[in-house]
Amino acid sequence: MIRALAILALAATEVIGHGFLRHVRIGNNWYPGWDVNTDPYRNPAPLRSVRRTPSDSGFISDPASSRITCSIGNEYLPAGGTLTVAAAVMNYMARCQGSCSTYRGDSGSPWFKISQDVYSGGKWGNQRLIANNFTATVTIPSKLAAGDYLLRHENLALHGATSVGGAQFYPVCIHLTVTGGGSVSPSGLAFPGAYKANDPGILFNPYQGDAANQKYVAPGGPVYKF
């Protein structure tokens, strides 16, 4: 039953500001992510529930890019085939239309935000993630209707966000099957489409101090209220 928690274990690369999703834990079971160090060089490419990310763990700078949905993962369907000092951590979901192995999620408005960790208590969300051994816990809403979903996990690095095009997006998509008795089927957000380059949560100066950072509003709107 995939209902309560998905544990996302991220790996930092040697280049500060780059990273990838190494493992997903659901309950007591661990599932391998897309390992940028080995998976791109295997033939045939391994099947993963986590879609591909760039081999250099690189970011996306244009929020209107087609890669904003699932990074390069949508270019290698069927699917499977660090973080900086200031970064928001956000999680979105979209119910797959048909099989998740071929569903791209890049048309219409199927996405909704289920959680976010931005600036609080003097720290950014990614600083808490790093302090927790590069691990983030995502709670799947208990009222969510059963079905197959994409979970879009994203880190938004803001260290260069003082100018347009300076924010760095690190999205990755994971296939999940949600079970249980929920009945709510949210939607309303589009990727690409939900973000604009001059959104206040994307064009932002994180160096103005605690008071300014506490007023930070993440892009993509509020977390959906179930």
Image (cartoon, helix red, strand yellow):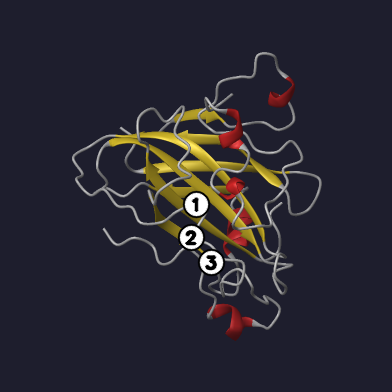
Q: Secondary structure at mark 2?
A: loop
- Which residue is labeled 2 in the image? 194
Q: Position of residue 180 (x, y in %)?
A: 22, 37
Q: Secondary structure at mark 3?
A: loop
Q: CA distance from mark 1 to mark 2?
A: 6 Å
- Which residue is labeled 3 in the image? 118
Q: Are marks 2 and 3 in contact (CB under 8 Å)?
A: no
Q: Position of residue 30 (x, y in %)?
A: 50, 29
Q: CA distance from mark 2 to mark 3?
A: 18 Å
Q: Are marks 1 and 2 in contact (CB under 8 Å)?
A: yes
190 displayed left or right of 43: left
Nearest the viewer among 116 and 200 is 200
Q: CA distance from mark 3 to mark 1?
A: 20 Å
Corner quadrant of residue 197: bottom right
User: What amino acid does circle 2 point to?
Assistant: Ala
14 displayed left or right of 151: right
The quarter of the rendered structure image containing the N terminus is: top left
Residue found at the very far bottom of the displayed protein: 211
- Which residue is labeled 1 in the image? 191
Q: Are marks 3 and 1 in contact (CB under 8 Å)?
A: no
